Amino acid sequence: MAIKRVQSTCNFCALDCNLDFYVDEATNQIVKTVPVKGYPVNDGFCCIKGLSLSKQQTTVKPNTLPRIRQEDGSFKNVSWDEAFTHVADKMKELQAKYGTESVAGISTGQLTMEEFAIFGHVMRNYLHTNVDGNTRLCMASAAVAHKGSYGFDAPGYTLNDLELSDTIIFIGANPVVAHPILWGRVRNNKIPGHKVIVLDPRRSETAMNADYWYGLKWRSDLLLLYTIANQLIEKDWIDHKFIEEHTEHFDEFKSFVKAYTLERGVEGTGLSAEQITELVELIHNGKRVSFWWTMGVNQGYEAVRTAQAIINLALMTGNIGKPGTGSNSITGQCNAMGSRVFSNTTMLTGGGEFGNPARRKRLAEVFGVDESMLAEKPTKTYNQIIEGINDGSIKGLWILCTNPRHSWTNNETFAEAAKKLELFVVQDIYDTIESAEDCTVFFPVVPGIKKEGTYINLERRLSAMRPVLKRGENEISDYEAILGVGKALGMGDALKGWETPESCFNLMRECSRNMPEDFTGVTWKMLEDSHGIQWPYPEGREEEFSDEQRRLYADGKFFTPTKKAQFVFEEVRENPYQPSAEYPYVFNTGRGSVGQWHTQSRTKEVKFVEDVSLKTPYLYMNTEVAAEHDIHHMDKIRVYSINGQDAVFSVKITDNVQRGELYAPIHYIECNKLTPSNYDAYSKEPNYKGAVVRFEKL
Ligand SMILES: Nc1nc2c(c(=O)[nH]1)N[C@H]1C(S)=C(S)[C@@H](COP(=O)(O)OP(=O)(O)OC[C@H]3O[C@@H](n4cnc5c(=O)[nH]c(N)nc54)[C@H](O)[C@@H]3O)O[C@H]1N2
Ligand SMILES: Nc1nc2c(c(=O)[nH]1)N[C@H]1C(S)=C(S)[C@@H](COP(=O)(O)OP(=O)(O)OC[C@H]3O[C@@H](n4cnc5c(=O)[nH]c(N)nc54)[C@H](O)[C@@H]3O)O[C@H]1N2
Ligand code: SF4
Ligand SMILES: [Mo]
């Protein structure tokens, strides 16, 4: 039998591990999956989700056609052309009847760069409407923090920094579960006496494997970070030279944090004075200190400022741009980094504000369109889109590669919205997802294993997705589906250059020219069978950028007009959801296991994950609290949330959550039934980890 090998990218988490797939060409089946040895991210390893990618072939039904809901509620299968025309006509009709912004899209950080670029072109440039992404639920706080502090949404690290750091501090991040390959890099750290430190209210799997765990009170990170900053300044444990040469607004920051005394820190965080002092000393004693944060920071009501407070610590101690240092935001989805720069949602494709004349001119040239066609303002945010549907101003929605009925905060508000839509297009690789229940059009598309495009990982590394399996009749990709609707809309010449993912890649290269992410030196072919390439990689300067592991900010220059990083800070705010007599418990949420992915549409079919996963929702409760309520392992409780909703969960008893906390994995739809409609003021990212609840035993 003829076996071919195809190297491609895992499209689950932001590591973007590369894998070699061995395919029996006669049967079009994957016979073996081998993580690529020597690949700078995963060097011969990967997690169960990457290994299970081969299982997806069993779920794609060949010859699946799109379908349109009929007046009697049933679905009718139609040809792809008919479906494209239907969606295009309906969008134009709604815009004519209710206004330009009466249709909207919700995109994703899990498609290829080319796919959300063309979606942004069709929806934002041509139709002049709104498209936000599920990245709003995830990375928006980090993106806004980066822009404010560094001048561009550019995390500066390379994964190697985990092996070069002597003091590794994880804040609201649980890589043992969420990014196992990243945790592997921590395990590879050979620096004698290096320390791993975790700040998390929960004794997470990562905390259990760390040298130090600080179990602070929920949402008290900002207070703690300002207290630490004040202590470092008082002890004069700061890098005056770096601050002087490469930053601005330190003096104001210094006066500001004076009020954040140790006593105040102790009172607000629940940590002892000794613990805070120990942490300050650990930061001071480290020669190469790195700070890493994820959703425990991004999903809060003062998340942007918290992320910036982490950046401030790195700046004031000079821990940035050097090996083993950095204030490093860990990205979640496989292409969140690509979506942040190329989706044309919060900034112009490739970067730049919507009103920036030079960028508008450049993009109009690249796309061969009139400047007036380009989107004129940032998108309405995710919450505004859902609110817009519920208040009747938005009548049409197209979602792709995301499952908001499950993942959106206070998710009954999405259920309500879905029923009000006149046009609701769901484009997914499963028609069984909760979001598809009320759709009016379903676009079945092929999974990553059958398509091509480019991914950008958490350390800015571009890598290639290439078709591993052949497609069946009628099987089309996300790219082709969006292009099809674009053509049916009559975009004509505005689609010149967008014919294929490869031609789109070339447009994106040009969009990146002279921008921070400049990858004009990378070609489509170069990425094949490669080690991936980190941006920037500008044309003509390839030699200068030839190292396989590169970090930004080594020269102390940032992307602000003055090239200096900014100290950004603001008084801590009152938590909108303080535990009270009525709602005494914090409802913490997050990842449940290495094998489960978000809303589980993909991972629930992986037998060895499903065999060990519970089918019904559960949460973790502290052992003492369970005893006080006479609750035993797997007893059921009804949980009532401050958002007015309630749901039933089974209880797992553990010492790893604090007395005042319940921890619910997000992989069950009940979880977000209970999360509130509450957002960070600047990023509009949901405060997913901060609801308060009460419960009764059933
Ligand atoms: N197996 C698996 N891996 C995944 C995913 C998945 O669904 N499954 N999803 C991917 C995606 S898109 C993302 S964004 C990442 C998320 O990766 P992580 O952010 O690491 O995962 P979470 O479990 O959401 O949250 C991390 C921790 O934040 C803590 N936390 C809660 N409140 C606070 C607080 O107030 N302060 C602090 N300091 N910590 C707090 C929680 O207790 C939790 O342990 O994972 C990615 N990897
Ligand atoms: N309470 C709480 N809620 C949370 C979080 C939390 O920590 N706490 N985390 C938030 C975060 S960080 C994130 S990123 C979101 C994730 O939320 P979602 O994005 O809604 O979750 P997924 O299950 O990843 O949804 C991806 C969808 O894309 C489909 N899909 C997979 N591959 C393809 C493809 O190639 N093409 C198309 N068209 N579809 C495809 C899958 O079948 C699935 O339906 O959840 C958020 N929700
Ligand atoms: S660590 Fe992330 S990218 Fe690597 S195999 Fe697992 S899910 Fe895929
Ligand atoms: Mo995420």
Image: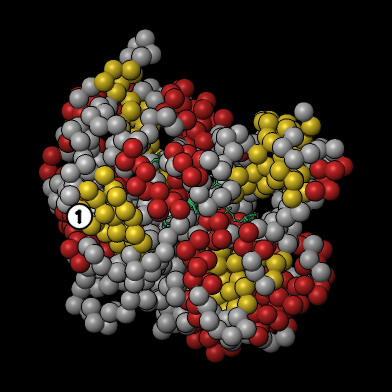
Q: Which residue sits at x=74%, y=77%?
A: 278
Q: Is mark 1 within 8 Å of ligand 3?
A: no
Q: Quadrant of residue 261?
A: bottom right
Q: Secondary structure at mark 1?
A: strand
The residue nearer to you, when weighing 561 against 273, is 273
Judge left or right: residue 129 versus residue 676.
left
Judge left or right: residue 4 versus residue 417.
left
Q: Which residue sits at x=52%, y=78%?
A: 189
Residue 5 against residue 65 in the figure, above or below: below
The residue nearer to you, when weighing 530 against 3, is 3
* Ligand 3: quadrant of the figure: bottom left
Q: Residue 393: x percent and y percent?
A: 44, 28
Q: Residue 531: x percent and y percent?
A: 30, 69
Residue 140 against residue 696 in the figure, above or below: below
Q: Amino acid at mark 1?
A: Lys
Question: Where does label 1 land, which residue?
Answer: 4
Residue 340 in sight from this viewpoint: no
Q: Residue furthest bottom?
A: 241
Q: Quadrant of residue 78?
A: top left
Q: Which residue sits at x=22%, y=48%?
A: 24
